[in-house]
Image (cartoon, rainbow, N blue to C red):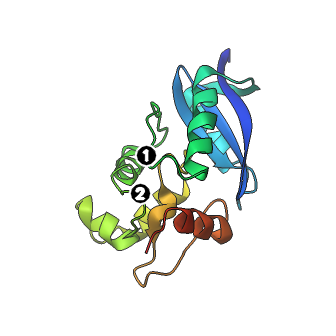
């Protein structure tokens, strides 16, 4: 296994993140304090037939720059090439995350309806939970149908922080 996912740590105001790039695409922005450590790592490494190598890349450096701008309130969208690693269903959910505007939220149920599978609310929630590119694919913008904050890899405090940063209602 000579393929490498080049990684570096980013210390965000709401917790440390591990950034990773593979062949000039961002494939990882995952919370280091996540509830189920290793789940995303195993899927990524197996799916890409690659191992983590602690080494900054042009992509992870650009991710750091864009995250700095985001957390300082100067950036509302990201423009890095993203590499989603998962099932076709997961990729469709993650792709939809990119369509949720800054400062807005959507429910898991609404996401399920938008992908044409209104009964797949739990599957949509599970796909969100498996998102390896937090913040860039903004799963923090997905909330419960009653507007409650529900599960988030970085913890509910991080989710609340991100939504408040964006001025989400």
The answer to whether marks 2 and 1 mark residues whose Cβ atoms lie closer than 8 Å is yes
Q: Position of residue 153 (x, y in %)?
A: 63, 60
In this orientation, which residue lies closer to the viewer: 42 or 144? Answer: 144
Front-lying residue, 102 or 142: 102
Residue that protrudes farthest toward the left in the picture: 116
Q: Residue at x 30, y 72 (%)?
A: 119
Give the image location of residue 37, x and y in percent.
73, 53
Q: Quadrant of the C terminus?
A: bottom left
State the quadrant of the N terminus. top right
Earlier sequence position, callout 2 versus callout 1: 1
Which residue is depicted at the point 33% across and 64% down? 111
Q: Which type of secondary structure does the marked residue at label 2 adopt?
A: loop
Question: Where is residue 46 drawn, in percent x and y?
Answer: 61, 33
Residue in view at x 38 percent, y 72 percent: 107
Residue 52 sits above or below residue 17 on the image: above
All told, the count of numbered labels is 2
Mark 1 nearby-residue class (10 Å; few <14, some 14–19, many ≥20): some
Residue 67 in which image quadrant: top right
The residue that appears at 56% across and 38% down in the rendered structure is 66
Q: Is residue 121 left or right of residue 6?
A: left
Q: Which residue is mark 2?
A: 102
Q: Give the Cα distance between marks 2 and 1.
A: 7 Å
According to the picture, the residue beneath numbered tag 1 turns out to be 77
Q: Give the left or right position of residue 14, taking residue 63 as reference.
A: right
Q: Secondary structure at mark 1?
A: loop
How would you rate the neighbour count of disc 2 (Cα within 10 Å): few for under 14, some for 14-19, many for 20 or more?
some
Q: Which mark is residue 67?
A: none
Q: Is residue 51 above or below residue 93?
A: above
């Amino acid at each position: 296994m000579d393929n490498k996912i080049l990684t570096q740590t980013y210390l965000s105001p709401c917790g440390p993140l591990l950034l990773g790039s593979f062949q000039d695409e961002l494939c990882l922005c995952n919370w280091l304090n996540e509830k189920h450590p290793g789940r995303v790592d195993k899927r990524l490494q197996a799916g890409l037939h690659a191992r983590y190598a602690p080494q900054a890349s042009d992509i992870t450096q650009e991710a750091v720059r864009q995250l700095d701008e985001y957390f300082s309130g100067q950036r509302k969208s990201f423009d890095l090439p993203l590499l989603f690693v998962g099932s076709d269903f997961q990729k469709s959910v993650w792709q939809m995350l990119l369509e949720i505007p800054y400062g807005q939220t959507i429910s898991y149920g609404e996401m399920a309806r938008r992908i044409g599978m209104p009964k797949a609310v739990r599957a949509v929630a599970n796909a969100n939970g498996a998102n390896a590119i937090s913040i860039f694919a903004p799963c923090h913008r997905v909330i419960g149908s009653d507007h409650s904050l529900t599960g988030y890899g970085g913890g509910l405090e991080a989710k609340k922080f991100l939504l408040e940063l964006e001025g989400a209602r």
